[in-house]
Amino acid sequence: MTALRSPEEIVRGLFLDSLLFLRALPAPRPLKVVDIGAGSGIPGLPIRLADPAISLTLIEAKRKRVSFLLTACRELGLSDVQVLEGRAERLVDENPGLASGFDAVVARAVGAEEELLPLALSYLKSGGAVVVASSPDSVVGGRMQVVKVSVPGTRSTRVFRTAMKESSVPRGT
């Protein structure tokens, strides 16, 4: 489920990278977080393991990956993590409880911003945040902002694209 081969590459490339999302997530806990396109559980599972105050939902369209996620959650004792099978676009339409139900959406290696952002915003409560892993040469612009997070023990930074769901309450009220 990953191109990384050595244990060091996996630790640095997947787990450490996942934990950097914590620095880009909204600060107050507890948080309800949904990982769209969860794949092998990166970044969602390491985020949840590191911070038990995060309530996690993993969304994955491919059955084989869903089976892996269910097994991983069972083996890690994460009975509170919800794993949903299906396309995120369809799930939010079919399950009204998912719409506007989360404080944050995280994603890694899923689609273009113009497709992902409207979908991610549909999962968020007002004031919620979308946090997407991005490349160092991210283009500034669009509706998402670039946030750089220092990687501990190195001189490098991790780049995220973020956006907030605007409050539905008119300003000044």
Image (cartoon, rainbow, N blue to C red):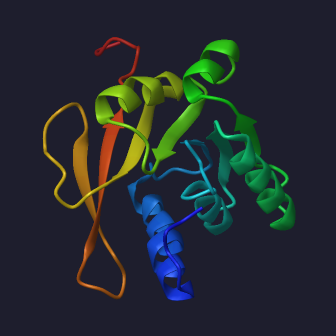
Q: Can residue 46 be seen in this view?
A: yes
Figure check: 36 above or below 23 = above
Figure check: 27 above or below 163 = below
The answer to whether residue 55 is left or right of residue 168 is right
Could you say where residue 112 lies in the image, as x and y percent from the top left? 32, 36
Could you say where residue 49 lies in the image, as x and y percent from the top left? 67, 66
Could you say where residue 150 lies in the image, as x and y percent from the top left? 29, 73
Figure check: 22 above or below 155 = above
Taking the spot 73% from the left edge, 41% from the top edge, the residue there is 63
Q: Is residue 99 visible?
A: no
Residue most toward the left? 140
Query: Residue 151 sits in which quadrant?
Result: bottom left
Taking the spot 14% from the left edge, 46% from the top edge, the residue there is 139
Figure check: 167 above or below 75 = above
> Which quadrant is the N terminus positioned in?
bottom right
Taking the spot 30% from the left edge, 28% from the top edge, the residue there is 114
